[in-house]
Amino acid sequence: MSGPQPDFRDKALFVRLFGPNAYAVGGFVRDWRRGILSDDVDILVARVSLDQIIAALEKHGKVDLVGRSFGVIKFTLRGKTYDVALPRTDRPKKDGARGHKDILVSADPDLPIEADLERRDFCCNSLALRLADGRLIDPFEGAKDIRAKLIRVTDPRAFPEDPLRVLRAARFAAVLGFSVDPSTYALAKTVDLAPLSVERVDEELFKILLSDRPSLGLEELFRLGVLRQLFPELNALALIIQDSVFHPEKDDFGHHTVWHHTKLTVDQARRLASGAKLDTPRMLALLLAALYHDVGKAETTQWEFKRGRMVITSAGHDGASERIARKAFARLKIFAWNGYPLRTTALLLIKTHHRASELWQNRESVTRKAFNRLAADTGGEIELVNLLDVADRAGRAAKPVRGLDREGRWLLDKFKELGVDRETIKPLILGRDLLRLGVPPGPGMGRILQELYKRQLDNEFETKAQGMKAAKRLAGGAR
């Protein structure tokens, strides 16, 4: 790539302190070769001891030694933090070790830069840029792979030693829009992913879902065998077909599978989430729901004679999907995200993902009660269940969705017209109100509160005063 060399805020300081021994490495260099200048810069310093690096940096900012035993420190200057490392090598801690935590890192300031680059996962990441003069160190032709948009393993012998690299291949496919080199699939078959922590698995999955086109990474998870080992509920969808009349979408080989529909739905949900400007937690809840919304079809799909022909049906798959997803989320330890009830919301969306369409289909006769119940059953996430419903319909085609369709617009307009929202579905009568009526705490109070909330959603009362009258009648009958 011709043109000016990449710059970043504190580049001059690293050059002044370490001269030709300071390099930018990894994703910063890769993205520069892609024409993207990133703020995330990792620094490698060669031929200088770690103690000397620490002494030099301490004069200018804060040095965190938490990774010192691995030859890495964190340097913070004016709010910006850099990882500063010595050249390193990786090897298994013991013969046959295959866990991500079983990698032994050895730092050596005199190690050649090329040896450090060889330890990195893919050739497109095995690049270094000498800061003093802009010389590119590229022993594995990573720049060529970047031009070809290819993810190729740097060291096939070392690849199986770190199982996280299999998931990273899929993640880079989604985030960068690159293709995986075919030789990687054979390597991935030899890797046992069981030792990976669920936290690392979730991190890679979430990055794939939040990328601009998640289906690229999801398909690579399938091809690399990750679904088979870590996400069996999703892997099963590749063997479940759908009725071609209702689901005309098909993959490149003509298969009308639930897996193909799922990938399209996730992509459409991602586009809709971006257009709706959802914050990250709510976007992730929507995308998880899109990913798992049809997993119940593996249990419920069957042939049935309807409308004069044999039809593929999946009656009750929404409830089955919620049950299966609940177990999967528990196994993956998916609970909350920055305080947002990620797991709870995603499960509610999965369970109710057909209800919006049912309201549309019965729009001539549906009442406010049905809208109250849908709002209550989604925890007030009316926008999200609508987006999932629109994405599910749009998942019957590869054409990118550009916004809400007619059904989606009608649903939101109807909620607004009826005045149903997160606030209106809050229970008007609470336990403390029943205590004032002399109802003691316990199962009896719980049953009365449940009945009162049901009547509230059925529009039998709309104010607290009206609700208290109903509560008095129920409390009197319970004595």
Image (cartoon, rainbow, N blue to C red):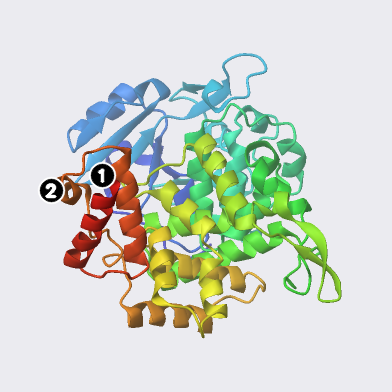
Residue at the extreme top = 94
Q: Amino acid at mark 2?
A: Arg
Count of picture labels:
2
The residue under label 2 is 436
Residue 180 % position (x, y): 68, 51
Dot 1: element: loop
Residue 143 seen in this snapshot:
no
| Quarter of image, res 102 | top right
Point out which mark residue 34 bears: none
Please indicate whether residue 53 sits to the left or right of residue 235 in the image.
left
- In this rendering, position of residue 355 left or right of residue 458: right
Expressed as whole percent of the image width and height from the top left, the position of residue 357 reads 55, 73
Task: Give the CA separation, mark 1 to mark 2.
Answer: 15 Å
Q: In this picture, is 121 found above or below 340?
A: above
Which residue is labeled 1 in the image? 479
Q: Locate residue 169, reporting x and y percent.
A: 61, 46
Dot 1 crowding, Cα within 10 Å, few <14, some 14–19, many 20+: few
Q: Amino acid at mark 1?
A: Arg
Quadrant that contains the C terminus: top left
User: Depth-wise, is mark 1 or mark 2 nearer the camera?
Assistant: 1
Residue 254, position as x, y percentages in the image: 82, 66
Q: Is residue 330 visible?
A: yes
Q: Are marks 1 and 2 in contact (CB under 8 Å)?
A: no
Q: Residues within 10 Å of mark 2 (few under 14, many from 20)?
A: few
Q: What residue appears at the point 17 percent right and 51 percent down from the top-left corner?
A: 433
Q: Is residue 10 left or right of residue 141?
A: left
Specify the quadrant of the image occupied by residue 165. Answer: top right
Q: Residue furthest left?
A: 436
Q: What element does badge 2 sit on?
A: helix
N-term mark: 1 or 2:
2
The residue drawn where x is 31% and y is 57% is 452
Residue located 28% across and 67% down the image: 424
